[in-house]
Amino acid sequence: MQQLHQDLRHHRKPLDEPPVSSPSGELPSLDQRQHHRHLTSNNTDNPSVRHPRPDDHAHADPTSIHIAPTATSPVQVEAPAPQAPTPAPATAPSLLAATHYELNQSPVSSNAATPSRSQSSTPVKHRRLKPFIQAIMAFEKGRKFSTGTSVHRKRQMSTLVEKEGHFGPALTTLYLGISAVFSDDHTAVVALAIHDTIYLIDFSIKHIVLDDALRMGADVIADYVISEVERYEHENFAKFIGAGLPTTLKYMSPTLCSRLWLELDIVPIVMRPDDEYKEKSFWDVKRVDEQADSMARKCIMNFGPSLVPLLQVGFRGIVQTDAGFRAHLTTVQNHKDTCTPATWDSMLTYAKKLRHTKTKIAFFSSTPQGGGVALMRHALVRFARLLGVDLTWYVPKPRPGVFRITKNIHNILQGVSHPDQRISAEEKQAIIDWITENANRYWFSEGGPLCTPEAGGADVVIVSNFFGCLPEFPSPVVPSFMQERQACSVSWHMTSAYRNPHPQYLPIHGTDDIRSDLVAKAGSPQADIWDFLWSNIQGCDMFISHPIPIFVPHTVPREKVVYFPATTDWLDGLNKHLNKWDSGYYGHIYNVACHSQRMTELNWPARKYIIQVARFDPAKGIPTVIDSYAEFRRQCEKANFTDVPQLVVCGNGSVDDPDASLIYDQTMSQLETYYPDLIKDVSIMRLDPNDQLINTLLANAHVVLQLSTREGFEVKVSEALHAGRPVIVTNTGGIPLQVKDKVNGFLVTPGDWKAVAGHLMDLFTNEELHAKMSYEARTGVSDEVGTVGNALGWFYLAAQWHEVGVEKNGKGGIKGNEKWVNDMAREEAGFPYKEGENRLPRHFTQSKELPVNTKPVSASG
């Protein structure tokens, strides 16, 4: 029995593509699936074993939900050796039994008691035959969708597309349910159920033969679902938002989830249909069409009013990304395709180490949504779970008034606040109290991430974008002092590693650029707040900063400094390719939002447009954007250029950004006061969180601006380049690292609106120049600013800190000496950068002049 449990645990870890433990992304062989079916079908009467449900351990160890490495079943990186075919018993419907086995067994083990479910008196094997038999009896020849939109609506929508483009028609929002049952002769009966937010609209049934397809490595279930759903959308002017499916279908159709997400922009929600907390499950008595209907209904509950998956934060502040880990968006192979082999192999080197040593990594940041740090963490958590790396993300419970203080600190350190503004002792104490309360209540309590590893705590702790005073640390972590970055803003960050009395290392990761020249000025507000911060973090062992030396204050020892750029995810809603149908859906949403606020709507594609995507922040240079557009329009009129574009300035909000309303009002006042004749051509919008909407606006713009007066790294620039958009950006912060002047964009001095207008004229009147820059933009983005590059750096640091510890008596530790983390990681893995390889320029960190305070700064705060 013990060996049986070990075998089952090895076969229960479904990565988002099989083989179960392989990152290769290849489909499982027929032999492997037969082995899985034989294993499960021979043990259907064992009530003590089941496959894990997506939320089994959501409040303890999120990485164990999909992949739970154990001493008896380590996760492998290479695909397992081919296994000999194991024929299924001739007397039992093995695939069907395997399917229902996954859905009906109880946990292998559990730290907490699980409510027992009532036991049916129906024989197990006979009971599990019911869905397939019922499907055959009820739908022997299958069933096609029988309802659709009216002829009048089809004609009306077609006319709108012809007249107004794809931003014109309003698509009907729908949800999808998918289920399938399988017979022993390798036939699948697949059901699709279509729901609005209230009721079942229609459903279809399809019989699919799997034998030949399985042997050829094809995924015919995914092929059918994708083609059928796309056809329904186009014929009925509809847009599917989410699709619910059971865990067994995800295994039997391993590419279905990622293809729904990447090809049709449908969020796949994978669920265990028989809720173990209910006394009775009806899943086994439902026909396959009824199962699909159930999946659609449950899928709807994972989406909020803005039609994006609900963000879930569990106990202790664990951020449960992707709808509580139920949205399975990508496969390992998808990520592998976004980078070079050297980057991928280097990353796998450290992923192996972390899995082998069972290293637990905990990230902390101030908010779970709304900023660049949050975007990076969502992507990193998603990717780490695919690879079986134990990585968890925590946020503190918010407190009213604290974010106003942290925003003031942010503005002071950036040098955009009033020269006399300071943070009072009471405000500093309020931040300390906030973090201390969270730490004591959630993170130092029994089993919390800041306990010793032996007591269930993390091995490596990384505090991102806030600094906290955590009690019981030799050098406390300073509370949150700078806000999370907006989706369009990625900036200065610093990470510091502590040596706890226990074998635990604590990096701290902050955001946005610091005016180190003002910090170095004794008695300045910047020096005062940095004294407060530094007094709490000076015991750290390493600081990780954006690759901009001037952002690192002079008090930070250079041997502790390393450089690590901000990143984005090429497969998330902000960056993945959207087809014309889906782009039209989100473009229409934008115009509806504009109409409701009496704001100018976009007339694309009839008119081109210029865009800046940024939060409404004093440092984003929005006044320069307006002035530049006004000057550009004057030059157009002078040159008799009549095909003038519109201007869009938009961005998402953030829970810790109280300045947004003020800056928005100032922008509207500037436009109404000085350029009232341009109001009809300018669209200025604060948007609800919706990544694909921002993606649509950015990808279809003719030119993208980023005219910040102060900036950190601003990875939104790389996102625009990745979409093939020429950029006009200011020469500040980390922006020049991403843009090759006059190759994929133009660099200008902050505030130089005349230069911006001149470059706009060039890009709108010279089609050849625009096409050349678009190509250079699309093909010139480095791996270092993608999720795999981000994971490479963090996995390397975690693996190294866990292996060597901090420096003690001249031994151990990692010497930073202002190196780039990616260089260190690639060299250590045996894949150093080669000449000519696409990477961010290093010369920005090789020569610098750092301000030095001539008067010693107190460390007492």
Image: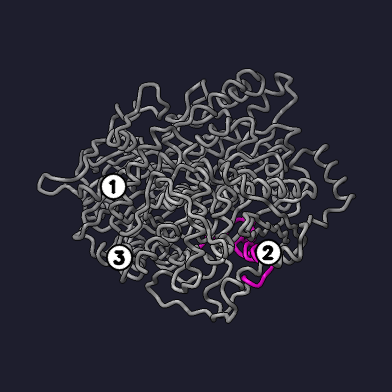
Q: Where is residue 148 in the image (x, y as percent from the top left)?
A: 82, 54
Magenta-span inclusion, residue 607: no
N-term mark: 3 or 1:
3
Q: Which amino acid does label 2 sit on?
A: Val
Within 10 Å of disc 2 (Cα), the crowding (few <14, some 14-19, many 20+) is: many
Pick the residue in front: 52 or 208.
208
Q: Quadrant of the C terminus?
A: bottom left
Quadrant assignment, res 770 = top right
Q: Name the residue under label 1.
A: 799
Q: Mark 3 points at which residue?
A: 456
Within 10 Å of disc 1 (Cα), the crowding (few <14, some 14-19, many 20+) is: many
Residue found farthest to the front: 90
The span picked out in magenta is: 284-312
Q: Position of residue 610 (x, y in %)?
A: 63, 33
Q: Is residue 529 visible?
A: no
Magenta-span inclusion, residue 306: yes
What is the number of the mark on residue 288? 2
Cα distance, mark 3 to mark 2? 42 Å
Q: Are marks 3 and 1 in contact (CB under 8 Å)?
A: no
- Residue 721 relative to residue 136: left or right: left
Q: Is mark 2 on a helix, strand or loop?
A: helix
N-term mark: 3 or 2:
2
> Is 437 rendered above or below residue 650?
below
